[in-house]
Image (cartoon, rainbow, N blue to C red):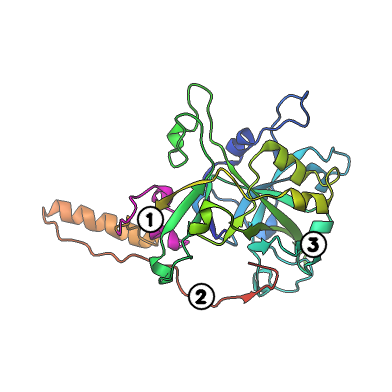
Amino acid sequence: MCGRTCLTLEPKELEGCCKYRKNEESKPEAPRYRNEFNCGKKYTPSFNVAPTDVTPVLVSAVHFDDSTDSADRLLVPMMWGMVPWWHKGDYGKHGLTTNNCRLEGLAISKLYGRPLAAGQRCVILCEGFYEWQTVKQMKASDRPAFYVHMPQAGKVKVEDKTTWKGDDGEQLQLLRMAGLFDVWENVHGDKLYSYTVITFETVGKFAEIHHRTPAILETDEQVSDWLDFKRVPANRAINLLQPPKVLQWFRVSNIVNNSRNKSAQCNKPIQEGSTKSPLVPKSKLMQSWLVVKKRKVEETDDKPSVKKELEHEPREKKPKPDPDNC
């Protein structure tokens, strides 16, 4: 499954990383970023993207302009966690867990069948996603966290942004996941675009970490087939989704457990077996307090230790699980 992602690129940077060819003869072109109001929710680059956050996704341009070619692409900000089009009231209170959806039975799903049939397919972009090892019995707060990403060329390191544009032309390889999106409207007519990530049963080495895996699109051809719903019908597109073969991952700190921790340390590798994690204050108020405290300590030449507690994801009331969701 997929519970957190990392996407720190600005829209213009994303456009450059998502260049594509409509056919073998055409020149590479970048998808245009189309901003949306989304009921006031905005995209903010983050090392720790969680459900209900907004991130840019790739879609066929024909969803927004019937006169365009279905092979043309747009980057559109959408909220993670699909809001059903039929929901009434507050979009955050539909009561279903829709950040992921199962591939099995997708076409006959009461919730996801309609957007699938309408060709509302999207590609979720990220630098990597976080996964917790759940195949071993242990407390949720003690589960090892891993950062999963695509293989990188040459000297590019997915956790080090300074390496993403080398002198030899190498650049970051984004991780691309197949998903579906829907459009919800409030009583004022404002639209909210939202998406869900498609997952299936894990095959291969990744099964040592989790029993579900996002549907990763590893090649440009797979991305093209998934987005171009007029050329590739739904049943064929579903059959083209295959378990990923080239994923890589490494252990990261459990500071990522708390979605409020947005530190750059979230996607940095740590040694296997390490129990130490960088500690990050959860609020700007606490951060400011620590800065003032440090200044006072330095002025008095006194250095008492400051005890901080490692945060874990707060216990919240869980929404009603969707039967089609993983």
Q: Which residues are magenta?
A: 254-275
How many numbered marks have been drawn onto this rendered protein structure? Answer: 3
Residue 14 is a magenta residue: no
Q: Which residue is more in the foreground, 48 or 38?
A: 48
Disc 3 designates what residue? Answer: 107
Judge from the rendering whether residue 137 lies leftward or rightward of residue 128; answer left or right: left
Q: Residue at x 55, y 52 (%)?
A: 204
**Which x, y percent locates residue 5?**
54, 53
Eyeballing the image, is 9 above or below 206?
A: above
Judge from the rendering whether residue 247 lies leftward or rightward of residue 118; answer left or right: left
Eyeballing the image, is 138 above or below 305?
A: below
Q: Residue at x 83, y 45 (%)?
A: 232
At label 3, counting other C-alpha atoms closer than 10 Å, the crowd grade (few under 14, some 14-19, many 20 or more) is some
Q: Residue at x 12, y 55 (%)?
A: 300
Give residue 113's quadrant in the image: bottom right
At label 1, counting other C-alpha atoms closer than 10 Å, the crowd grade (few under 14, some 14-19, many 20 or more) is many
In front: label 2 or label 3: 3
Q: Secondary structure at mark 2?
A: loop
In front: label 1 or label 3: 3
Q: Residue at x 50, y 49 (%)?
A: 148
Q: Farthest residue toward the front?
A: 204
